[in-house]
Amino acid sequence: MNTRKLIGLIAVFGILACNSDDDDNNTDSCDQLTVISSKQYVSEPDHNLTISSLKINENCLKISFGSSGCSGDTWELKLIDSEEILETNPPQRNLRLSLKNEELCNAVITKELSFNILGLKVDGNKVLLNIKNSDDQILYEY
């Protein structure tokens, strides 16, 4: 094979490799993964927090929330799915934001975290996510 053909093949494979990143599966932009566990849905800490907003950006669910504390640096947070799929139209999943907060200060700390929700997809192209702590729901379309 001559050098010109080899360089051409390398260029084609390089372009294909660069274009193979599928934005729909890009999870690098989310802060954490969503836990799918009926056991953890029930057993993980449930310290008081207030969810102020929910927003989906691609496959990340952004949750803005607040709780009392000193800085929020020691908080342990998980978004947990109950593993239950409600057969409605559209289907629904139940989730809750678990907070372990052992800070004993009276300041109100607000934060925003995003969670990878790619694993919550069901058959079809959308699922309604019921967020227990917020008494709200958000439609995830994919």
Image: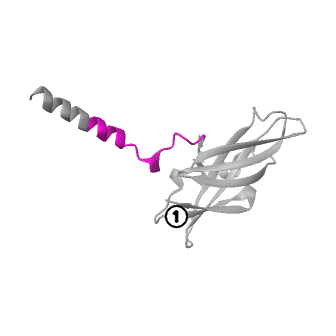
Q: Is residue 58 left or right of residue 103?
A: left
* Residue lying at 25% horizontally and 34% vertically, measured from the top left: 11
What x and y, as percent, mark residue 122? 49, 61
Q: What is the number of callouts on the image?
A: 1
Which residue occupies the foreground of this view, 109 or 41? 109
* Residue lying at 14% horizontally and 32% vertically, measured from the top left: 5
**Quarter containing the N terminus:** top left
| Residue on which disc 1 sits | 126
Q: Give the extent of the magenta segment.
A: 13-31
Residue extending farthest top: 3
The 10 Å Cα crowd at callout 1, few under 14, some 14 to 19, many 20 or more, is some
Residue extending farthest bottom: 89
Which residue occupies the foreground of this view, 135 or 30? 30
Q: Is residue 97 left or right of residue 104?
A: left
Which residue occupies the foreground of this view, 142 or 90? 142
State whether residue 83 appears in this view.
Answer: yes
Rendered image quadrant of residue 136: bottom right
What x and y, as percent, mark residue 125? 48, 64
Q: Secondary structure at mark 1?
A: strand
Q: Amino acid at mark 1?
A: Lys
**In the picture shown, does residue 112 fall above or below 14?**
below
Which residue occupies the foreground of this view, 91 or 12? 12
Q: Is residue 103 left or right of residue 18?
A: right
What x and y, as percent, mark residue 87? 55, 70
Q: Is residue 68 left or right of residue 94?
A: right
**In the picture shown, does residue 109 fall above or below 93?**
above
Asked if the magenta segment contains residue 25, the reply would be yes
